[in-house]
Amino acid sequence: MLSINEMIKHQIYRLERSIDNMERTRESMIRRYRDFQIPWEWLLNTGLIGQMKLSSLRLAKVYLKRITKELQLNECSGEDNLLLQGARFAYRVHQFAGGFDAETIRAFQELKKIGMGSLKQ
């Protein structure tokens, strides 16, 4: 059975694959529409991909807060491993979404504080 953290990571990977597929499909459709002189500009402004990227930021925020809470409660034995997983996941979402929003930045900074605190000990 997958943990909550694994389920969250799985969801973001599925989201990335979906958007990649949508973008490839859109690009091939644009080429075909252009070849047949069919208006295609409307395909660029659907807003769906932007909404999906915003959803990935919300997912990242939840994931980072969950890891932060687990580290604060000392519920995990592999503290360094969990910090590394959180940082990798945050980086991946950051690259995918094109940056963080303010709430996700705060969640990442909280995780960073805990990470810096554990390095000092």
Image (cartoon, rainbow, N blue to C red):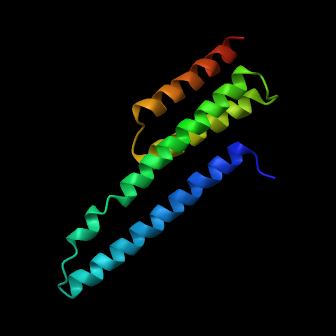
Q: Pick the quarter of the image with the C terminus.
A: top right
Residue 85 in picture, x, y percent from top left: 66, 38
Camera-side residue: 75 or 93?
Answer: 75
Q: Residue at x 58, y 37 (%)?
A: 62
Q: Quadrant of residue 47?
A: bottom left
State the count of labels: 0
Residue 83 in picture, x, y percent from top left: 66, 30
Camera-side residue: 19 or 116?
Answer: 19
Camera-side residue: 106 or 27?
Answer: 106
Please say if 114 is above or below 80: above
Q: Residue at x 58, y 55 (%)?
A: 13
Residue 50 in picture, x, y percent from top left: 37, 53
Q: Residue furthest top?
A: 121
Residue 58 in picture, x, y percent from top left: 50, 42
Q: Residue at x 52, y 40 (%)?
A: 91
From the viewer's perspective, is 100 left or right of 83? left
Q: Residue at x 74, y 27 (%)?
A: 79
From the viewer's perspective, is 28 left or right of 95? left
